[in-house]
Amino acid sequence: MKIAVLMSTYNGEKYIRPQIESILRQVNVEVTLYIRDDGSSDSTCDIIRAYQREHKNIILYCEKNIGVGNSFMQLLYLINDEYDYYGFCDQDDIWDENKLCVAINTIKSFTVPTLYVSNQILVDKAGNIIKKRYDEAPDISYLQILSQNKVSGCTMVWNHSLNAILCLPQHRPSEKLLENRIHDVWVAMIASTVGNLIYDNNGYIYYRQHENNVVGAQNDTKLTIFKNQFNKLIGRAPRNGRSGLAQELVEKFPNLPPKYSLLFASANPHTIKNKWILIKNREQFLKHTGEHSFNFILTTLIISKKPGNTGISRDIRTEFTTDLLLSD
């Protein structure tokens, strides 16, 4: 089983060695490790080059800084399609030697586009175990991912069928979107709407928590929820995050079935009709975000109109919004 593992690095000299070594120790798989360095100013590239001299299955691209989301997706577009499976990898974790073979065995029977994700074992910066990230399996529905993603990119493994969809030029997200909603959100949204998304509540990755994490494990505390709500109220970008993601998804995949009506409403929340649809169905969002009903209503009402066309035809918007208005 041939798998391409994709890593984006940035000033990762402190923890990258154990991460690379844990990938090289994977059992029962043929791994090629692709690394795109995102403009590091430390010795990260030198460390990787030292591993390259001993391991021919490590391929390095040292490039300019474009941000973590764009870096991962640009790397995905660079590699060829000869692999059976693909997966993302952070620069500072440690993998169990069975991580990849467990993921592949879980999805190998699927011929349709399929994404595997799993739980994580949280460790401190010294590698000491803290706890499992999720005691119970989190919600991985498309509305959960759209509202507050709980799917981690470093656990992702997907098949060739899904990779073909991700890499088509007409399905690629904009660089602007990836600045705010990073690569794992985009991949998870596509898998949850046009393919399969399978979650494993076991953890095969030691997910390091430290001061330099680009994205760490966040707890949904009352303070975190309050901060998120406050940021949505005062900033246009956080307010429009959900709508921006939904907008690009329906532009790239305009033929999604009617069960994704709320996705289409979220993609064009600037009309009075769609504001009403979102507010009417707010409980379906609130259970995913934990925010207060009043805050959801307020932020929905004040979402500013974006320039340009959504790319969704009037007929499609009417079909989906009518379907939703008629349902309770």
Image: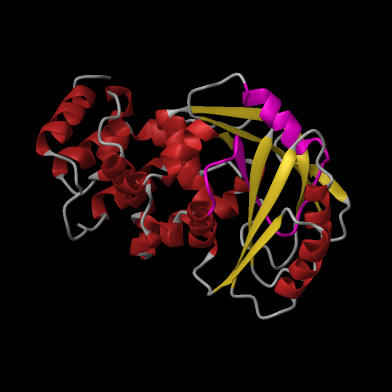
Question: Which is more toward the observer, 82 or 183?
Answer: 82
* Residue with the most extreme left position: 314
How many marks the image carries: the answer is: 0
Write the residue at 44% across / 42% down.
166
* Residue with the most extreme bottom position: 41
Question: Which is more toward the observer, 294 or 87?
Answer: 87
User: Residue 28's quadrant in the figure?
Assistant: top right
Location of residue 54 in the rendering, given as x and y in whole percent from the top left corner: 83, 61
Question: Which is more toward the observer, 107 or 206?
Answer: 107
Determine if residue 286 is in view: no
In this picture, residue 302 sits left or right of residue 93: left
Question: Which is more toward the observer, 159 or 262?
Answer: 159
Location of residue 62 in the rendering, given as x and y in whole percent from the top left corner: 61, 71
Location of residue 109 in the rendering, given as x and y in whole percent from the top left corner: 60, 18
**Magenta range:** 79-108
Quadrant in the picture for the N terminus: top right
In this picture, residue 107 sits left or right of residue 209: left
Q: Is residue 313 above or below residue 69?
A: above
Write the residue at 80% across / 63% down.
51
Queried whether the magenta region covers residue 247, the answer comes back as no
Queried whether the magenta region covers residue 98, the answer comes back as yes
Determine if residue 228 is in view: yes
Q: Is residue 208 above or below residue 144?
A: below
Quadrant in the picture for the C terminus: top left
Q: How is the image coloured?
A: secondary structure
Location of residue 297 in the rendering, given as x and y in whole percent from the top left corner: 31, 45
In this picture, residue 187 sits left or right of residue 53: left
